């Protein structure tokens, strides 16, 4: 017989009880609706189509083909002691062959316009860990990072939750296609100052999530000048760099540093990952590339909490060292993403929906502000719910990306088959036609 | 390609966490590693080199695992048989983890405890190794400035897992030692616990939990039932958490057997389960430190949920989850492995202990772990840390053994050394203990 004993409630940390993990936002609520009623072409054709997940599923066949032909090197290699050596390898420097392969892959994506030194590559379990780790290193609790809006909703957790660091937004709007301006940078900095918050750096995502567009070279120069004058850091999250439709349209901050002969470079840090460009989010492969020796050393030590499985380093090290393979992959991947994008934009246009002109990434930044009753966040969320529950599409509302202008939505197009995309576009077309009839 | 780093700027530009020594790597004990790295023993190429006995790794049973991997190509997504699952596994980033992974780990944990308890796969939460698990729990249970009581000696100077770094560096939590002494074989007593708690309270430090490692690193011993019950009662009374690091659970090779906290809480029914958390890993029991498989197993729903969200910062690669899930769901294999591993550890342990006994060197009676706790107190010129360090340097540079001095584990009594014996396979062993015993005999005389 159980005796009910009144247990004193045991305390957990402030971090544990806070909501800064951000999982209560609509960004995640849509996923729940999808999980409960997921679309399937045959078994559930009226289910919710997931368009809120920025995944790249368009180029798996190329990876699978590689594995078929290189099974041995990709696993334990030919040596009898291969498995054992790999299973024991826990050096936080990471497998040298893998770091070399990552550095050369990053160079290939930038068509050799920047060089990367394998000894500056620090490995982490995903870009999620890389961004948090850099924040721990560059800022103290209570300090701030300036981040252009709209931004990836996960940053609220990654940059703030356990670090105690704040995000102060750099407001961008549609008047200039959401590009960062020197005025916006200055305004954000002053805003932090007025709140007595010390700014430690600027964090940009290039190409941008959720905009699906690269940052102009001139804008990058301005941002670099700004951080230099203020003597703060610049973190450039370039995880979508391999998903730019045309390679010449992407300028990495690495190229600008090279053109400036690496003057003042120790304030710059690049985050990369294989989750988007290679479509391997499950493998947890992230890197920090820093031009600051102290940051490299510290980040490497800190990576002890978040190392990449040696088994995975072995697999990807062998794959990414094959330059013929990677060259072919990068080219085909860009092409397929561009085709998807054009299909998406074309379909939306037929439905009378406009989007921001994009040139990268796995999503479009779509303007549904004409559908809003009022230009407010509440109206935007009302439209979002209607699309989720009636049209059965999970898309991401701009407010969850901290966009200051209501009515914009991020719509992903690379995490499904072409057929499914067509179904989604048809649903959007019907929805827009209905609205024309009812409002006309 | 070097860059001119402005050091003055660095000090202002980086966070306090980045510029302090919380990572623990500046300690002088890295001398041992350097000595080994620059002159590593090899049976034929470098027979006079330094033998690595400071690394608690388990290399005794790789043949069994290799055989399994070869016979089960589907477990590896790089093989023809496994490749059709590649895409599904590669895109899965759900922080709940692959179901077969969680089920496999839960089953293995039960088997290691003789199936005397079962573990719920839904409570299995991933982390970046045990290193990540400890940090995650510290983030969940304590605020900066709070403390955990940790019995000495405890692991602070190992290549991977170091409580000083794992618990303190980024979380800001402190460690308050609970002193255990050689006079009673380092038994953990209620008096020592109370004394430590009192000390913390007087210093106005808020104690949030007690952290124990069972089986113990560096002692190689297991906690008996009475001690475990004492710990549960103590933490329950003080309403503080009890974190049990059981990463060496499957390395118990002799009587007395292993008793897990999971078994105790089934017996101590009054106990508040919200206070109980287990840290596990596959790095020691299976010998897979490279795969970074850490587990947080909490009986507290809120902690489980929070730790799971935090696991986003240290998930296990799904490629590895898939392999481990397959491996650990093979009951025939796991049962054979657990038995064979214990057997080989027992034999290896006996060779060392007997060999040392022959030259008059004793060690703490132990039945677990990948190491033993060697007693060289008689060889010290005086019972001080300095004398211990001097003896340790002698052992590294003249005896050519990299062992770990007790002071690096915060041991209160100088003269003890941790000696690892499972980190080289049988074939690289030279004739039993000759490099160890003779120079030690010289040092003694």
Image: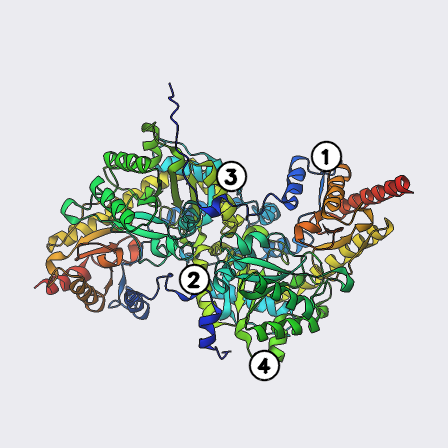
Residue on which the image places disc 4: A261
Q: Quadrant of the C terminus of chain A?
A: top right
Q: Quadrant of the N terminus of chain A?
A: top left
Question: Pointer 4: residues within 10 angstroms few (<14), some, or many (20+)?
Answer: few
Regarding mark 3 in the picture, which secondary structure is present there? helix
Q: Is residue B414 left or right of residue A61?
A: left
Residue furthest to the left in view is B445
Measuring from the top left, give residue A439's x and y in whole percent: 89, 42
User: Marks 1 and 2: same chain?
Assistant: no
**Alpha carbon separation for disc pair 1 and 2:** 51 Å
Chain of the residue that carries numbered disc 1 in the rendered image: A
**Alpha carbon separation for disc pair 4 and 1:** 57 Å
Question: Pointer 1: residues within 10 angstroms few (<14), some, or many (20+)?
Answer: few
Marks 3/4 in contact by CB < 8 Å: the verdict is no
**Residue B269 position (above or below residue B134):** above
Please say whether residue A236 is visible from this viewpoint: no
**Alpha carbon separation for disc pair 2 and 4:** 30 Å
Residue on which the image places disc 1: A44
Front in this rendered view, residue A306 or A150? A150
Q: First in sequence: mark 3 or mark 2? A: 2
Name the colouring of the figure: rainbow
Q: Is residue A339 left or right of residue A260?
A: right
Regarding mark 2 in the picture, which secondary structure is present there? helix
Residue on which the image places disc 3: B100
**Alpha carbon separation for disc pair 3 and 2:** 38 Å
Front in this rendered view, residue B62 or A42? A42
Measuring from the top left, give residue A10's x and y in whole percent: 40, 38
Residue on which the image places disc 2: B17
For the point 60% across and 78% down, the residue is A258
For the point 54% across and 72% down, the residue is A267
**Residue A195 position (above or below residue A257):** above
């Amino acid at each position: 017989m159980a005796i009910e004993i009144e247990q004193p409630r045991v305390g957990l940390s402030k971090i544990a009880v806070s909501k800064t993990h951000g999982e209560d936002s609509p960004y995640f609520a849509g996923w729940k609706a999808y999980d409960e009623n997921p679309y399937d072409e045959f078994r559930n054709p009226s289910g919710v189509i997931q368009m809120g997940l920025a995944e790249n599923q368009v180029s798996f066949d190329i990876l699978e083909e590689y594995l078929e032909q290189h099974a041995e090197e990709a696993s334990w290699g030919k040596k009898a002691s291969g498995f054992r050596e790999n299973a024991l390898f826990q050096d936080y420097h990471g497998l040298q062959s893998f770091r070399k392969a990552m550095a050369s892959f990053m160079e290939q994506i930038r068509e050799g316009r920047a060089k990367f030194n394998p000894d500056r590559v620090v490995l982490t379990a995903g870009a999620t860990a890389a961004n948090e780790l850099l924040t721990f290193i560059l800022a103290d609790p209570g300090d701030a990072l300036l981040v252009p809006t709209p931004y990836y909703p996960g940053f609220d957790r990654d940059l703030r939750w356990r670090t105690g660091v704040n995000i102060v937004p750099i407001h961008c709007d549609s008047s200039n296609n959401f590009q960062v301006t020197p005025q916006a940078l200055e305004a954000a900095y002053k805003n932090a100052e007025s709140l007595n918050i010390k700014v430690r750096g600027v964090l940009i995502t290039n190409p941008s999530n959720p905009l699906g567009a690269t940052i102009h070279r001139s804008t990058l120069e301005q941002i670099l000048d700004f951080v230099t004058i203020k003597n703060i850091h610049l973190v450039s999250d370039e995880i979508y760099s391999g998903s730019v439709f045309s390679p010449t349209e992407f300028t990495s901050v690495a190229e600008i540093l090279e053109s400036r002969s690496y003057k003042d470079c120790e304030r710059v840090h690049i985050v990369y990952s294989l989750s988007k460009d290679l479509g391997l989010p499950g493998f947890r492969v992230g890197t920090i590339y820093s031009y600051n020796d102290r940051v490299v050393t510290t980040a490497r030590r800190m990576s002890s909490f978040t190392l990449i499985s040696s088994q995975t380093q072995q697999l990807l090290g062998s794959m990414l060292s094959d330059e013929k393979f990677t060259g072919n992959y990068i080219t085909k991947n860009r092409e397929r993403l561009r085709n998807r994008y054009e299909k998406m934009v074309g379909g939306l246009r037929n439905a009378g929906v406009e989007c921001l002109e994009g040139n990268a990434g796995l999503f479009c930044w779509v303007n549904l502000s004409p559908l809003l009753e009022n230009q407010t966040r509440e109206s935007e969320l009302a439209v979002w719910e209607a699309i989720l529950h009636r049209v059965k599409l999970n898309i991401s509302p701009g407010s969850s990306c901290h966009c200051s202008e209501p009515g914009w939505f991020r719509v992903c197009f690379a995490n499904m088959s072409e057929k499914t995309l067509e179904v989604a576009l048809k649903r959007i077309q019907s929805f827009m036609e209905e609205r024309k009839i009812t409002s006309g | 390609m070097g860059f001119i780093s402005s050091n003055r700027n660095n000090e202002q530009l980086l966070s306090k966490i980045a510029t302090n020594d919380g990572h623990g790597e500046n300690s002088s004990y890295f001398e041992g590693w350097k000595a080994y790295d620059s002159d590593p023993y090899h049976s034929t190429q470098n027979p006079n080199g330094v033998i690595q006995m400071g690394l608690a790794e388990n290399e005794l049973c790789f043949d069994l695992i290799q055989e399994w991997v070869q016979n089960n190509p589907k477990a590896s997504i790089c093989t023809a048989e496994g490749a059709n699952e590649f895409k599904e596994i590669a895109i899965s980033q759900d922080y709940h983890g692959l179901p077969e992974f969680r089920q496999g780990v839960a089953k293995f944990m039960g088997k290691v405890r003789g199936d005397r308890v079962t573990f719920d796969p839904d409570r299995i939460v991933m982390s970046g190794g045990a290193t990540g698990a400890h940090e995650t729990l510290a983030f969940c249970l304590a605020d900066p400035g709070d403390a955990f009581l940790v019995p000495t000696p405890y692991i602070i100077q190992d290549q991977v897992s170091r409580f000083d770094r794992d618990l303190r560096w980024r979380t800001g939590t402190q460690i308050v030692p609970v002193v255990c002494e050689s006079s009673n074989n380092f038994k953990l007593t209620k008096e020592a616990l109370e004394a430590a708690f009192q000390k913390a309270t007087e210093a106005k430090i808020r104690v949030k939990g007690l952290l124990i490692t069972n089986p113990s690193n560096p002692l190689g011993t297991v906690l008996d039932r009475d001690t475990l019950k004492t710990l549960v009662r103590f933490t329950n009374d003080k309403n503080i958490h009890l974190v049990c690091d059981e990463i060496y659970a499957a390395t118990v090779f002799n009587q007395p057997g292993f008793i897990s906290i999971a078994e105790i809480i089934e017996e101590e029914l009054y106990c508040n389960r919200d206070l109980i958390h287990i840290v596990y890993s596959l790095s020691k029991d299976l010998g897979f430190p490279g795969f970074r498989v850490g587990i947080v197993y909490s009986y507290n729903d809120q902690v489980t949920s929070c730790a799971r969200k935090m696991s986003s910062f240290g998930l296990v690669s799904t490629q590895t989850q898939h392999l481990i899930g397959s491996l650990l769901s093979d009951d025939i294999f796991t049962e054979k492995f657990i038995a064979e591993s214990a057997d080989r550890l027992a034999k290896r342990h006996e060779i060392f202990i007997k060999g040392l006994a022959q030259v008059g060197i004793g060690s703490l009676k132990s039945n677990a772990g990948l190491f033993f706790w060697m007693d060289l107190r008689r060889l010290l010129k005086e019972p001080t840390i300095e004398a211990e360090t001097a003896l340790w340097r002698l052992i590294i540079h003249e005896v050519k053994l990299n062992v770990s001095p007790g002071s690096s584990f915060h041991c209160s009594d100088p003269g003890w050394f941790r000696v690892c014996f499972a980190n080289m396979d049988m074939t690289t062993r030279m004739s039993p203990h000759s490099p160890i015993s003779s120079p030690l005999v010289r040092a003694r005389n």
